[in-house]
Amino acid sequence: MEIFEIAQLVTGIATLIVASVLIWQMTLQRKTLEIAHQDADQNISMAAMDTRSRTNEWFAENCTAEMLEKFDKGIDSLNVKETLILRTYYRSTMRVLSTEWRLGRLIEQPWYYKNTFNQELMFKYKAFRELFAEQQNRNMGGLYTGLMEIGREALEEAEGKKLDA
């Protein structure tokens, strides 16, 4: 073997070693990014649950049995303070949902969003359903179109009928 062939062989082996090290580093980086993504999702989940809990506690402190009866009758039956409480609770809940949606959290699992619309106070009471319909007519659109479609489906289920487009 000549020196030139030995140099080529050594260069080839060195290239293979460097490529192997780079692949190993990329694998480690990928695992680190996956862990960071899981941590971020867990943080988003905890923040959403914390915000939702605090919103529900605030609502429970500010809501009365009489107010709930009025919520069943609709927005027109509410006084100014009750309307403020209704809109504040609605906005807080929608902010959490729309932020989760924007961040891509569970968008492939629409049941999560539908359950929030149906199981929180949102669509149990006529006033909340009316407020959602009013807000949908303003249409958040764009990025939130999918979320609003899920909300519309939940509203149709709550109302027991198809709504006009």
Image (spheres, rainbow, N blue to C red):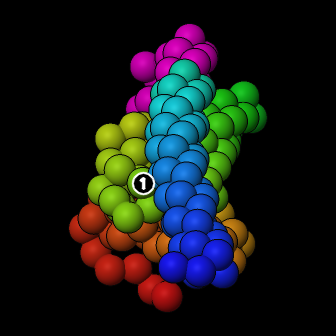
Other-residue count near label 1 (Cα within 10 Å), few / some / many at <14 / 14–19 / ≥20: few
Q: Main secondary structure of the magenta part?
A: helix
46 relative to 19, above or below? above
Q: Position of residue 12 (x, y in %)?
A: 56, 73
Q: From where the camera sits, is residue 161 visible?
A: yes
User: Toward which corner of the image does residue 5 lie, by quadrant?
Assistant: bottom right
Amino acid under label 1?
Answer: Leu
Q: Residue at x 36, y 70 (%)?
A: 153
The reply to whether the magenta stretch includes residue 67 is: yes
User: Is 80 left or right of 76, judged from the image as shown?
Assistant: right
Is 148 in front, or is 78?
148
Would residue 57 be counted in the magenta stretch? yes
Count of numbered circles on the image: 1
Position of 26 compared to 123: left or right? right
Residue under label 1, please give it. 106
Picture coordinates of residue 89, whole percent (x, y): 61, 35
Instruction: Tell which residue pokes out farthest to the top in this image.
Output: 61
Residue found at x 51% / y 26%: 46
Task: Describe the element under mark 1 as helix, strand or loop.
Answer: loop
Residue that appears at 42% across and 54% down = 106
Residue occupying the point 34% across, 59% down: 109
For this view, does 38 lie left or right of residue 94?
left
Above or below for 127 versus 8: above
Residues in magenta, as a range: 52-70
Residue 81's spot in the image, x, y percent? 72, 28
Percent of width and height locating residue 57: 53, 15
Residue extending farthest to the front is: 2
